[in-house]
Amino acid sequence: MAERSVPDIARETLKLLASRRLPPTPENYQLVYEEVAGHLPKAPFPHKALRQIFGVLPTQSAVQKRIALHFNQAINDQNWHGIQQAILAYAHMDEVKNALQPAGEAQTPAMPQMLDVLPPELAEQLARVLDHILPMLAEEADQRMHDLTDQLVNFLRVSPPPLQDLLHMLQNYAYRLSFATEDQAQRRMAIQGMLQTAVTHTAELNQQDATIQTQSRQLLAAMQKPWTLRHLDQLQQQLQTLLLRELDLHDKALEVQEHIKALLSETLQRLAALSENSSSHSSHIEQCASKLEQAQGLAGMASVLEELVGSARAMASENRIAHAALQDLRERSEEEQRSIEALQKALDSAEELARHDPLTQALNAKGLEEALERELARTQRHHGPLSLASIALEGLQALAVEQSMGAVEQAQRHLAVVARSVLRPQDQLARDQPNHFFLLLPSTTVEDARLALERLQQELNQRPLLCEDEKISLQFSAGVVQAWPMESRLDLLNRADQNLQDARMAGGSRMAQH
């Protein structure tokens, strides 16, 4: 059976109150509400019995009066914790008297204090929590939420906050915060919906482009995953790539449109000239026909025939010229089409190679630059560790001499494949030079990075490169560094390269860290 909502229970409670003709007092409403909701009825607070106890409490001394007043206030507030503290205070009455003895006399530990106010340390921690909550809300969020936060923070810091007043303010704040968090969730859903609409619209406008279709599907699938900071960075990069692709296609379409317009204009001019020449020659032929009818004898006919033959030859020559011009336009149009297809393939290839190395499918120099900038920014935000390793394969020159340059490329691809199988998903491998790799290890200390490189070397030993039926065990040297606070990207890269040089100077196939 589906669980009933609070409004449904409240409506049924009011109906039962009316049917039983009970006055709508808070007590009656609570009893009927608990009955409808299926909750066990709460025991009523024993005001009368506690008042009787309060009436017989001793109040001869100032301490007894203070405890009795606290007991009475706890009854008024229906505060069982306060009543318990008052009873404990009476139980430790002898300790209170010893605590009030003059200095120099034997003293015993003082009675536990009754918490009427919040301790300053706890109040300050609560205020700091609230200070960190407010920036999480949108700037245009409900002003009432900002006012309540400021009011509660000031209440916690300006004066020792009474517990009952603080409890009431926290209840109001939690109620308002629930609306703010729900609003934030709706904002995220709205942003996600707008992004999905934009990506879908872009894909619909470019159905003929396979690259945009693939990028759109990948981006829509990525939007369904949790939006962590790392994931948002990836979404931003993918969306930027998609939009740049569409801009390139738009510019290319405008360029093609201008070319087609120029070709059509020239074609029309050629056709108009051909039509004009044909009309002129047709008129001339008609004139020749009239002259031929009026000619007297062969001498008169010969001149007319000569003129007619000359006109026919001129028309044939002009037709050949026009046909050659139209054929040239056709060839130019086909050449433009081939050029467009070549540009399309070049654009696709350029986008694939923009951030990845074509040989190893690892990041290239540009991809490494972007990834390193993102990880350094994240490290500075969260104050976590970040390690970078500069790696160089050993013995590639000898491998090229013994085998071929193709074997060197196979060795580099093999290193990338083995690294991806050993490392974590968040670790990133980059190749900026033919025999030089970088390994980016987020949230990793330099000691853990060294252990990761040792695991990689062990895996390379267990999975040698197979080249022409020969097993080749790959070895590498590495320099490992951990990013310093506020260190720039270039400084971090230079330190890693310097450690790599130190490792190679020490004999190769080594690791150096500082």
Image (cartoon, grey):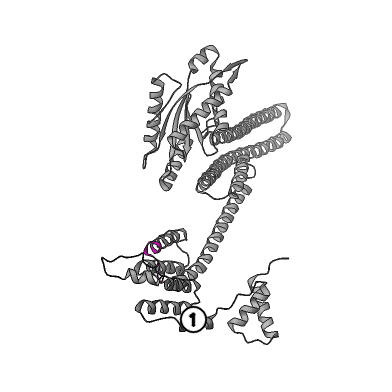
Q: Quadrant of residue 407?
A: top right
- Point 69% across, 81% down: residue: 16
Residue 217 seen: yes
Q: Residues within 10 Å of mark 1 (few under 14, many from 20)?
A: few
Q: Quadrant of the C terminus?
A: top left
Q: Position of residue 55 (x, y in %)?
A: 46, 84
Task: Give how far across and how far down residue 172 sits, in percent.
Answer: 49, 71
Of 91 and 55, which appears nearest the observer? 91
* Side of 349 where 494 appears, left or right: left
Residue at figure coordinates x 42%, y 79% from the top left = 68
Residue position marked by numbered label 1 in the rendering: 53
Quadrant where the N terminus is found in the figure: bottom right
Looking at the picture, does residue 130 appear above or below residue 372? below
* The one of 210 and 239 positioned closer to us in this rendering: 239
Residue 35: image quadrant is: bottom right
Magenta stretch: give its range. 115-123
Residue 199 in the image, given as x and y percentages of width and height: 59, 49
Residue 156 to residue 321: above or below: below
**Is 199 situated above or below 48?**
above
Is residue 365 visible in the rendered structure shown here?
no
Secondary structure of the residue carrying numbered label 1: helix
Q: Nearer the viewer, residue 47 or 320?
A: 47
Magenta includes 117?
A: yes
Report the residue that reaches farthest toward the front: 106
Asked if residue 254 lies in the magenta stretch, the reply is no
Q: Residue at x 45, y 41 (%)?
A: 375
Amino acid on which disc 1 is placed: Ile
How many numbered marks are there? Answer: 1
**In the displayed image of the protein, which residue is found farthest to the left?**
104
* Residue 11: % across, % down: 66, 77
